[in-house]
Image (cartoon, helix red, strand yellow):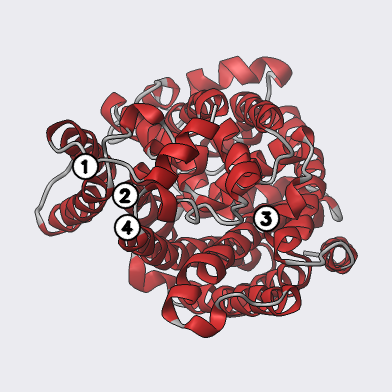
Amino acid sequence: MQILDWIVLSIYFLILLAVGVWAYTKVKNSADFYTAGGKLPWWLSGVSHHVSGYSGAVFVAYAGIAYTHGFTLYVWWAFTVSIATLVAAFFIAPKWAELRQIANIQSPTEYLLIRYNLTTQQIIAWVGTIIKVFDTGGKLAAIAVLLNVFSGTSITLGVLLVGVVSLIYITIGGLWADVWNDFSQFIVQIIAGITMFVIIISNTNDGLKSIITMWDKLPEEHSHFFNDPYTISFAFAMLLINFFSYSGGTWNLATRFISSSSATVAKKAGVLSAILYLIWPLILLYPMFAAPLFLENLSDPTLSYGIMAKRFLPTGLLGLVLASMFANTLSMTASDSNTVSSVICRDILPNVSKKFKNLSRKNELKLARATTFCFTLLTIVVALNASKFGGIFGLIVTWFAALLGPISIPVILGLLPVFKHSGSIAAIVSIIGGLSVFILLKIINHDSLALEMGGSILASLLLFIGLGIIHKERMSKKAKLLFTNLK
C-alpha cells in the first residue's frame, strides 16, 4: 500500500468516527441505542440487513473456496441466503416489528420470557451470547489477515486497529451509528466491487465475454453448481441454517426488523435484502472465481483476493477496496456488539442482580454502552487467538453455523402460532439435543461437511416439532394474548 491508499483508508475511519459522534446526539435512551427508536425506514433497514449478513470473511475464507471450488460458493451461500431471506420477509420479519410495538421489546430474546419461561430465555440468552463472542472474533481475525496481505501489518496490530475503531463508534452511537455505517459502507463496497470487477475483466483476453468463457479455462468442476464437499446436501443444510439465521436467529439481523417502523416496512426491508443477495454477490465474487487464471497453484487460497487486488488495482483504489472490506467487517462486528449488549442488559443482568432492574433512562444508557464496550473487547481477545479455534473458517462457518440452529429454532418458530404447542420443554430439549449432536459429530470421525453443518440444526428441529406434537404444553395467558395480537 502507498501513502494515498493509507490516506483513503484513514479518511474512511474518520468518517466512521464522525458517524458515531453524530449518532451520539440522536441517542437519548436504551430504545434509541438498541432499536433506533423503531424509526428505521425500509430502505435503510434492508440495506443494513444485507450488509450485516457478511464480513471480511467473504474476502478470506470464501475467497479461498471460490479459488478451489468455483461457482458452488454462490449457490450454497448467496443463493440460499437470498431464498431464506425472501421467505423470512413474508413470514417472520413482520412479527419482529409487531413485537416491538406490542411488547416494547429491545432485544431478540426479550419476548421469550412471555412465550416460554425464564429458564428457556436464560439458556438461549447465555448460549447465544457465548457463541457470538467466537463468531465476532473470527470476523475481526479475517479482516486482520487482509490488512496483513495488503500492507504487511501484523495480524495482532490489524485486530487491534479494527477492534478499537469498532469499539469507539458503536459504544457511543448505538444502532443509529451502525445502520448509517452500513449504508455508507454499502456505497463504498459497490464502488470498490464494480471497480475490481471491471479491472479483472479488462485483464482477460475476451473482455466481457470472459464472464462466460473463463469457465472453459478453469477446471471443469469449477462451473458446477455442486462441487464436493459442497454437495446438494450441504446446500440444503445451508438453506435451513440460513433461514433460521437471516430471519432473526442471528440476533443482529433480527434487530433490523425489530427497529423497523411497522410490519409492512420490515417485510419490504427483507425483500430488498433478498434481492441484493441474489444479484450483488455475482459481481462481488467474480474476481474470486477468476483468481486461478492469474494465480496458479497458490499455496494459501484464502490470500487470493488480497493478492489480486494488490496486483491489479492502482494506487488509491487499493485503499478503497481495503476500506470496503473493513466496512463489511466493522458493520457486522459492531452490529453484533450492539445486539448482544441488548440481550445482556435486558435479559441476563436483571436476572443476575436486582440492582439492574428498574434503572433510570440515564443509567440504562450507561449500562448499554458499558456492556457493548466489554463485549467488543472480549471479541478482540478471541480474534487474537483465532488459530486455536480452527482458524477463520472454523470460527465463522463451522462453529457458528453448526451451533446457531439449536438456539435459533425456539426463537424463530416460537413466533409462529402453528408451533404454539411446542413450549418450554420442547425448546430446552431441542437446544440440549442439538448441542449434543454437534459435540458428538466433533468426536466421531466422518467426512461429510453437510452432516457436520446440518446435523445439529436438524436434530433440534425434529425435537422441537416432535415434542410439540407428543407433549402439548399449554401456553400462559400472557403468551396467548401475545399470539392474539400478532397478525
Which residue is nearer to you in this view: 197 or 295?
197
Distance between the alpha carbons at the discs numbered 2 and 3 = 23 Å
Residue topped by disc 3: 331
Residue 5 showing in the rendered view: no
The disc labelled 3 sits on which kind of residue?
Answer: Ser
Q: How many marks?
A: 4
Which residue is nearer to you in this view: 423 or 3?
423
Crowd class of label 1 (few under 14; some 14 to 19; many from 20; radius 10 Å): many
The disc labelled 2 sits on which kind of residue?
Answer: Ala
Residue topped by disc 4: 120
Residue 374 showing in the rendered view: yes
Distance between the alpha carbons at the discs numbered 4 and 1 = 22 Å
Residue topped by disc 2: 402
Quadrant that contains the C terminus: top right
Residue topped by disc 1: 455
The disc labelled 4 sits on which kind of residue?
Answer: Thr
Which residue is nearer to you in this view: 233 or 300?
233
Distance between the alpha carbons at the discs numbered 3 and 1 = 30 Å
Labels 1 and 2 touching (C-beta < 8 A): yes
Task: Give the x, y percent position of residue 326.
Answer: 69, 58
Labels 3 and 1 touching (C-beta < 8 A): no
Crowd class of label 3 (few under 14; some 14 to 19; many from 20; radius 10 Å): many
Task: Give the x, y percent position of residue 309.
Answer: 69, 49
The numbered mark at residue 310 is: none
Task: Give the x, y percent position of residue 17.
Answer: 84, 68
Task: Give the x, y percent position of residue 280.
Answer: 66, 30
Distance between the alpha carbons at the discs numbered 1 and 2 = 8 Å
At 37% across and 64% down in the image, what residue appears?
122
| Left or right relative to 425: residue 401 | right
Q: Secondary structure at mark 1?
A: helix
When asked about the image quadrant of residue 340, the answer is bottom right
